Image (tube, coloured by chain):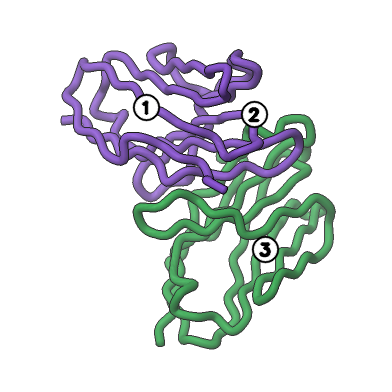
Chain colours: A green, B purple
Amino acid sequence: QKEVEQDPGPLSVPEGAIVSLNCTYSNSAFQYFMWYRQYSRKGPELLMYTYSSGNKEDGRFTAQVDKSSKYISLFIRDSQPSDSATYLCAMRERTNAGKSTFGDGTTLTVKP
Amino acid sequence: DAGVTQSPTHLIKTRGQQVTLRCSPKSGHDTVSWYQQALGQGPQFIFQYYEEEERQRGNFPDRFSGHQFPNYSSELNVNALLLGDSALYLCASNQYDQPQHFGDGTRLSIL
């Protein structure tokens, strides 16, 4: 079983919808949690970076971490066609910033 | 401020050959990590370089090796290429406890 499991999708939503992307993990040593966005033929782009349980908001994006349940989410409000991409959750242990463990990604399509 | 840059963008090789991929980290970053991303999957950690030494390694065979130079740039070498080595190879860099930033990768195709 993988250390990080991500809802596989794909997801297709109308423009303006609220999107929820989710990951679960099994390694309780994971302390830092990231969300990356990856467009086709591009590298992952860092969207959100969180440490503690709770919510972190940045514009239309909200990252939520529940360490007790080993569950993280990314919410996208007022989704736009430009949000169409693959979203990757990633996480790492406290002492090693150079090694992240990724989910397999969820592909999102936002239709105009 | 240049981000992480990788070269070449795309490579085509045949089985048994050897390949070298290159990476320049984001300005101010001293740690470089390499990942392999197969189609439809998330990036898998290959290894990490800091102070010109391999610090940690993922579950990859010795055919995968690397190097970090004094200017923090890095190379990934893969020997005896297999069909299964076809993937997007990503370089990531970071500083201290900060999150990694990724380049756009090198797409390696093995025929």
For label 2, the crowd category at 10 Å Cα-Cα, with few meaning under 14, some 14 to 19 and many 20 or more, is: many
* Mark 3: secondary structure: strand
Instruction: State which quadrant residue B49 falls in.
Output: top right
* Mark 1: secondary structure: strand
Q: Residue at x 67, y 58 (%)?
A: A48
Look at the image and tell me in which quarter the C terminus of chain B lies: top left
Locate residue B15, reporting x and y percent.
19, 21
Q: Residue at x 62, y 62 (%)?
A: A22
Instruction: State which quadrant residue B75 falls in.
Output: top left
- Give the mark nearer the N terminus: 1 vs 2: 1
Could you tell me the amino acid type at mark 2?
A: Asp
Q: Which mark is residue B21?
A: 1
Q: Which mark is residue B30?
A: 2
For label 1, the crowd category at 10 Å Cα-Cα, with few meaning under 14, some 14 to 19 and many 20 or more, is: many
**Above or below: residue A72 compared with residue A18:** above
Tell whether label 2 touches label 3 (CB within 8 Å). Answer: no
**Above or below: residue A102 compared with residue A8:** above
Could you tell me the amino acid type at mark 1?
A: Leu
Q: Which mark is residue B66?
A: none
Q: Which residue is mark 3?
A: A73
Q: CA distance from mark 3 to mark 1?
A: 34 Å
Could you tell me the amino acid type at mark 3?
A: Ser
Locate residue A73, reporting x and y percent.
67, 63
